[in-house]
Image (cartoon, rainbow, N blue to C red):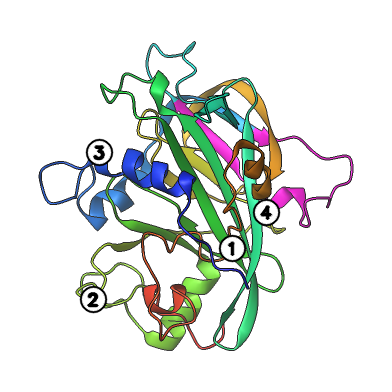
Amino acid sequence: MKIVRINLIVIVFFTCCLRELESAGHGHSIHTSADSIRQRTTENFDVVNLFKPIHPKTPDSPGFDIYMTPLIIQEIPPGGAGDMTDRFGLVTADSSGHLHIDLTHPVVYYSQSYVELGGSVYQQISYLWCYDMGNTECLAKNMGIAVQGIRMTMYGDGFPAIIEVLDDTSNHRILYVSTTLEETAVNVFGKPLPGRKYSIECNQEDLPDVVVARVVNNGPEPSGPFVYIKSCSHDITTLLCRCENSQFRDIQEDVLYELLPIEELSFVGINDTSWSREILNNKYPRSKEEKNQLLRTLRLPPEF
């Protein structure tokens, strides 16, 4: 199984998305507590754009069902209806090799992998999308490109069990788990550990920056989640099952995005794009003694 290496996208991602947003308070910035991260999962947006995938001519041509892709709910800030700042798009490069985002061509990049947990192998799908931070004034400086995304780990029946958030301006590692997985953890481990809300969460003293934001219900059929994204910061405020009630007032525009394999980034000079199950571990390197970061991050039942 290929192991991802830190590449240009990751360098831009961490220097632009994280460090520039850190306050003087030792690296914690906008959301400094697990409670505040969980509280924002209940936030309702006013007006949003809904990004959904273009259905391929061959339904399973990406190697998975198109309904496993995310539906992205992008908040539109007050008075920002015509602003393209919160659009993501195709990564391009000019003749000098500088990266840009084509905001007229929305794209979500994907990568598939498999992970062994507790003796069983689970499919994972990672999704990334890129913003041009040079067009925004919300942070008062040109910050280049920012990357957001999620990684889903699925049960054998295709339902998402764990969803990891690629980045957050709080510098916390944020995860979502299915209701089924949390119920299994309760049956195996009992009540949550001190300072935690969910039984699936590990000891807070050992992993203070790891937060399970909420549990997500399963729908009648396997599907990707609704992903709610805050304007400007591009933080993911919540994930919802497609069967759950929406948390916005109105949709201004339905926007179709193209689904492309992550290897497409090689055409703009980003060659180390074998994004595998280690996609998030650039920020949280796994221990040499552990096969996967999820084994340390969550109290996973022996078989879930």
Residues in magenta? 52-75
Answer few, some or many: residues within 10 Å of disc 4's Cα (few below 14, many 20 plus, some between 14 and 19): many
Earlier along the polypeptide chain: callout 2 or callout 3? 3
Which residue, as the protein is rendered here, is positioned at the far front? 96
Q: Secondary structure at mark 2?
A: loop
Mark pair 2, 3: CA separation: 25 Å
Residue 212 at x, y percent in the picture:
37, 62
Q: Amino acid under label 1?
A: Ser
Earlier along the polypeptide chain: callout 3 or callout 4? 3
Q: Which residue is mark 4?
A: 223
Residue 68 at x, y percent in the picture:
69, 52
Q: Amino acid under label 2?
A: Asp
Q: Which residue is mark 1?
A: 276
Q: For the residues carrying marks 2 and 1, which lies nearer the camera in this image?
A: 1
Q: Is residue 207 above or below residue 9?
A: below
Mark pair 1, 4: CA separation: 21 Å
In terms of depth relative to the viewer, which is nearer, 266 or 290? 266
Mark 3 near mark 1, Cβ–Cβ under 8 Å?
no
| 150 relative position to 186: left or right | right
Q: Which residue is mark 3?
A: 21
| 169 relative position to 125: left or right | left
Q: Is residue 242 above or below residue 98?
A: below
Residue at (60, 69) in percent of width and height: 2
Q: Amino acid under label 4?
A: Ser
Q: Which residue is mark 2?
A: 206
